[in-house]
Image (tube, rainbow, N blue to C red):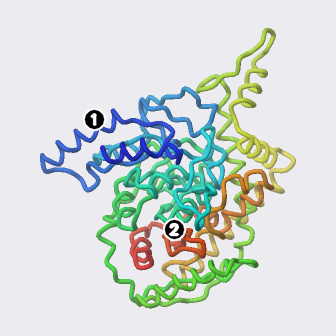
Amino acid sequence: TDACLDAIEGADALGAFVHNTPDLAREQAKAADARIQAGDAPDMCGIPLGIKDLFCTKGVPSQAASRILEGFTPEYESTVSQNLLDNGTIMLGKLNMDEFAMGSSNETSCYGNAVNPWRRGNEDTALTPGGSSGGSASAVAADLCLGATGTDTGGSIRQPAAFTGITGIKPTYGRCSRWGVVAFASSLDQAGPMTKSVRDAAIMLEAMCGHDAKDSTSADLAVPNFEAMLTGDIKGKKIGIPKEYRMDGMPDEIEALWAKGADMLRDAGAEIVDISLPHTKYALPAYYVIAPAEASSNLARYDGVKYGHRATLEAGDGINDMYEKTRAEGFGSEVQRRVMVGTYVLSAGFYDAYYNRARRVRTLIKKDFDDVFAQGVDAILTPATPSAAFGLGEMKNADPVKMYLNDVFTVTVNLAGLPGIAIPAGLDAQGLPLGLQLIGRPWEEGDLLNIAHEVE
Ligand code: GLN
C-alpha cells in the first residue's frame, strides 16, 4: 500500500486518480495486516486497488467525473466496492473516467483526461488510455495499484484494457451488483475487474461479484472459484471466428493479431471454426439508441434538488430555470448530446421508429449469439478495438460518430448480456499494445478466463 501511495504521488501527470484516500488506505492496510496475522485472510486481503469514480464510496466523494455531482459524498458503499472491502482490499482512491461513463477516450471527464502511460515509438504525443474506464486502465498499467474496478456499458472495460496492455473482463449481465454504481444505461451496465493478468482478473472477479437483493437484476447464482478454473486445458474447445467482424479497412496489424490469437488457441488444442453473427452491423446504431435512451431517463434525477451542484439563481427565476441552468452548467457536452438523443428516441412520435426498433435489433443480436453457442461454440475470438490508442485531442473535436466507431467490436456483448474479456496480445509497429477479445457463454466466465489464459 505504501509503495502504491508513493507511486501515485509521483504520477500526477497521468491524471489517473481524481481523489486520493491515503489515510483511509493506511488504516485499511493495518486492518488487513491484522487479518493476515490472525490467519483467516481471504485471497484479496491487503491488495491495494483503485476504484472508478462511478462507484459510490461511503464518506469519499463520488462524482462520476461530472460537475453536476460536485460536493456529493455518498452515505453508502456500492455493493461491489463493499464486497471488495469485505475481502480485505485497500482503497487507494477514486479513478478518472469519462463523465457518467459516456466516452471512449476519458476526454469527457470534468477533471480533464487521464493519460496512457504508453508512448508511440519515440514520440512525445500523449495518448488516450481509452474510456470510459481510462483512469483505471492508466493506473493499473502504470503500477499505481494492483487492480482497479471498471464498468462496461459498451466496451468501457475492454477498450481501455486493450489500449493500455492490461486485462479487463466484463462479466455476464447480472453477475456483479449494480447497486451503488451510478447508472448510465441500466440494461447494459456491468462492473468488472481491470488487472495485470488473467489470473488476477479471476481472483478479483470472484471477490467483486455475487447475488445482491438490492439489485433486482443481480443473478442468484453461486460464485464459482474462477481461479481454480484456470486449468490450462482447453483441448477440444470450439472457438468461433465471426466473419462479420472482419471490417472493411481493418488495419493489417489488427488482422495479423487476430490470426495470431487463433493460432495460439489452435496450438493449445482448441478447434477454430468460422461462424456468422449476421446482425453485427446493426449493433452500433442500436447501442447508440438504447444507451442514450436509458441515460436520458437515468440522468433525469440530476435536477439541482437532490444531489451535488445547483446553479446560482437570479431574482425571479422559477423552478424550471433552476433545472435548466443547473443541467446546462452541470453536464458536459457529450452528456447533453446523449440526453437529447435519448429524449428524442423516447418521445411519443419517434418511440416506435427508433427505440422499439433498436430493441428488436437487440433481440436479433442476442439470437445470433444463442445460435452459435447452440452449435457448440465455447467462445468467440475478435479484435478488442479497431486500432491502438490514439492521440489525446485527435478525435475529441471530430464528428462524434468517429468516436463511437471505437466500440464496434465491444457493444454486441453488452446488448446480448454476455461475458467478454480483453487480453493484451502484442504490440503494433509503433510499440503500442493491441488487445484481443474473447466472448463467452452466459455465466461461464470461468471457462472464458481459462481460454483467455492461453492467449495472454
Ligand atoms: N464508449 C461507449 C459509450 O460512450 C461505451 C461506454 C461504456 O462502456 N461505459 O457509450
Q: CA distance from mark 1 to mark 2?
A: 33 Å
Whether residue 31 sits left or right of residue 119 in the image: it is left
The residue where tag 1 is placed is 27
Most foreground residue, 51 or 439 = 51
Quadrant showing the C terminus: bottom left
Distance from mark 2 CB to nearest ligand 1 atom below 8 Å: no
Residue at the (71%, 26%) spot, across then down: 326
Q: Callout 1 environment at 10 Å: few (<14), some (14 to 19), or many (20+)?
A: few
Distance from mark 1 CB to nearest ligand 1 atom below 8 Å: no
Q: What amino acid does circle 2 point to?
A: Ala
Q: Is residue 239 above or below residue 70?
A: below
Q: If you read the primary sequence from the N terminus, does the residue marked by circle 1 or circle 2 appear first?
A: 1
- Residue positioned most to the left: 38
The residue where tag 2 is placed is 422
Ligand 1 positioned in quadrant: bottom right
* Disc 2 element: strand
Q: What amino acid does circle 1 point to?
A: Glu
* Disc 1 element: helix
